[in-house]
Amino acid sequence: MDAQKGQVRPEALADCNASLETEPLNRLGMPQTLANRGIIKLRSNDTAGALADFNEAIRQHANLAAA
């Protein structure tokens, strides 16, 4: 993911939001998308939003390494 390298596409947050709202994500897809969105928020200096997404990703899948 580009966000992990410090590069955030302007539409990346909107893409994650759309996926979380409209895509039928499976048991692993939901926490992975939350973790990805958390990385994007962290790179965008939204630490509170990032922490909330990381916490929710961990709540949904405690063994998810990305969170």
Image (cartoon, rainbow, N blue to C red):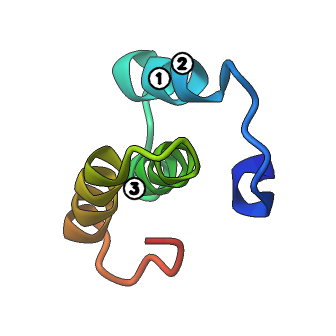
User: For the residue carrying disc 2, how many other residues have a C-alpha within 10 Å: few (<14), some (14-19), or many (20+)?
Assistant: few
Separation of marks 2 and 1 at Cα, in angstroms: 13 Å
Separation of marks 3 and 2 at Cα, in angstroms: 17 Å
Three-letter amino acid code at the position of disc 3: Pro
Three-letter amino acid code at the position of disc 1: Glu
Q: Is residue 10 left or right of residue 17?
A: right
Looking at the rendered structure, the secondary structure element under dot 1 is: loop
Residue 40 position, x and y percent, is: 56, 45
Residue hosting label 1? 23
Based on the displayed image, in which of its 4 quarters is residue 10 positioned?
Answer: top right
Image height of 3 relative to 17, above or below? below
Residue hosting label 2? 14
Count of marks placed on residues: 3
Q: Quadrant of the C terminus?
A: bottom left
Residue 26 position, x and y percent, is: 43, 46
Q: Residue at x 33, y 62 (%)?
A: 54
Observer-side mark, 1 or 3, equals 3
Based on the displayed image, in which of its 4 quarters is residue 49 positioned?
Answer: top left
Q: Residue at x 54, y 41 (%)?
A: 44
Residue hosting label 3? 31
Three-letter amino acid code at the position of disc 2: Ala
Mark toward the start of the polypeptide (2 vs 1): 2
Q: Residue at x 54, y 54 (%)?
A: 39
Question: Which is nearer the eye, 28 or 51?
Answer: 51
Image height of 10 relative to 54, above or below? above
